[in-house]
Image (cartoon, helix red, strand yellow):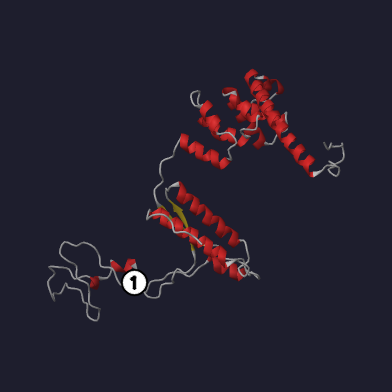
């Protein structure tokens, strides 16, 4: 095995590929056993309260100022140590490489004295994504309401030669203006836009509507003001919009959506002139299957 010389570096020149892989596997197994032993010792330190003799108010502070862990490492290991104290089988799972530290922190809050043996058996050698599914089986979440909410226009591409004027213009888009007489504040003051039922026709108190357009009558019992025509010169919303889409679905549909997302992400990372049309076609086909699966209209069509 290669050895680290103080002040030097590891020398791998004398190791073959098989020896390198074997040493890496052996070190990983030893690291699992050391992690389990470390968590057991940390749990005992907290149980005895001897971290206070080192002027540390908590095990978390002890890991930072005595063991020189980072804040994140201290928080994760101190939380895992408490879980192993409550469920000692976690130590065996960690030492045997059946459960990683992230998995301990994920399933730990969902363990009980009644279910921890069964849950640990189902959590062996699972990835983080698989453990997330297992947790949702133990504690399912309620279905989310269907929602499509716009975020706003997509971020514009960076200019090659940006200027201050261009920056100021981007912060002050075109203002929507209504012509005089069609603004909301003018509706209430426009006496000629209503024909009040029951008013004396042609009397002195009648409003003079000469020269005005034909007014919309106010029906009996209708208390709403008539709305004028929509202005024709409003600036159109042409910028591409971003949306948040949220809905509950089945696993098959979620897998198809994930495949389409990966294919489109691969295409987006390429230059437009180098992007393969087959990538867009494959992503579109997967997205179409996902839509069919979402609608529940039968099995998706076979792809070529």
- Across and down, in percent, residue 132 comes to 52, 40
Res. 230 image quadrant: bottom left
Picture residue at 60% right of the left edge, 68% below the top = 272
Q: Nearer the viewer, residue 229 or 193?
A: 229
Q: Nearer the viewer, residue 32 or 69?
A: 32
Picture residue at 50% right of the left edge, 23% below the top = 113
* Image quadrant containing the N terminus: top right
Q: In screen coordinates, is 8 left or right of 78? A: right
Q: Nearer the viewer, residue 208 or 246?
A: 246
- Across and down, in percent, residue 193 comes to 24, 72
For mark 1, give the secondary structure: loop
Is residue 152 at least partly visible in the picture? Answer: no
Picture residue at 66% right of the left edge, 25% below the top = 42
Residue at the bottom extreme?
211
Residue at the top extreme?
48
Q: Which residue is mark 1?
A: 230
- Across and down, in percent, residue 235 comes to 44, 72
Q: In screen coordinates, is 230 left or right of 91? A: left
Q: Is residue 72 above or below residue 268?
A: above
Picture residue at 71% right of the left edge, 29% below the top = 34
- Across and down, in percent, residue 248 comes to 42, 48
Is residue 37 at least partly visible in the picture? Answer: yes
């Amino acid at each position: 095995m290669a050895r680290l010389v103080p002040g030097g570096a590891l020398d791998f020149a004398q190791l073959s590929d098989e020896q390198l892989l074997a040493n890496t596997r052996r070190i990983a197994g030893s690291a699992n056993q050391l992690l389990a032993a470390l968590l057991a010792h940390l749990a005992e330190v907290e149980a005895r309260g001897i971290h206070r003799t080192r002027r540390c108010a908590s095990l978390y502070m002890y890991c930072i100022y005595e063991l020189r862990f980072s804040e994140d490492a201290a928080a994760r290991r101190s939380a895992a140590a408490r879980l192993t104290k409550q469920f000692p089988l976690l130590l065996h799972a960690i030492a045997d490489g059946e459960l990683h530290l992230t998995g301990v922190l994920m399933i730990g809050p969902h363990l009980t004295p009644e279910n921890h043996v069964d849950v640990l058996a189902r959590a062996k050698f699972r990835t983080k994504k698989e453990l997330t599914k297992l947790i949702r089986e133990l504690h399912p979440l309620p279905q989310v309401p269907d929602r499509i909410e716009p975020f706003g226009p997509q971020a514009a591409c960076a200019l090659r030669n940006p200027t201050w004027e261009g920056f100021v213009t981007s912060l002050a888009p075109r203002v929507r203006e209504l012509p005089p007489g069609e603004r909301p504040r003018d509706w209430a003051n426009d006496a000629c836009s209503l024909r009040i039922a029951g008013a004396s026709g042609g009397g002195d108190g009648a409003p003079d509507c000469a020269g005005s357009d034909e007014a919309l009558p106010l029906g009996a019992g209708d208390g709403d003001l008539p709305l004028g025509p929509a202005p024709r010169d409003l600036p159109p919303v042409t910028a591409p919009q971003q949306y948040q889409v949220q809905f509950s679905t089945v696993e098959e549909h979620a897998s198809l959506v994930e495949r389409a997302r990966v294919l489109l992400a691969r295409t987006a990372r390429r230059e437009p002139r180098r992007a393969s049309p087959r990538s867009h076609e494959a992503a579109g086909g997967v997205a179409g299957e996902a839509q069919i699966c979402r609608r529940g209209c039968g099995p998706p069509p076979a792809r070529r």
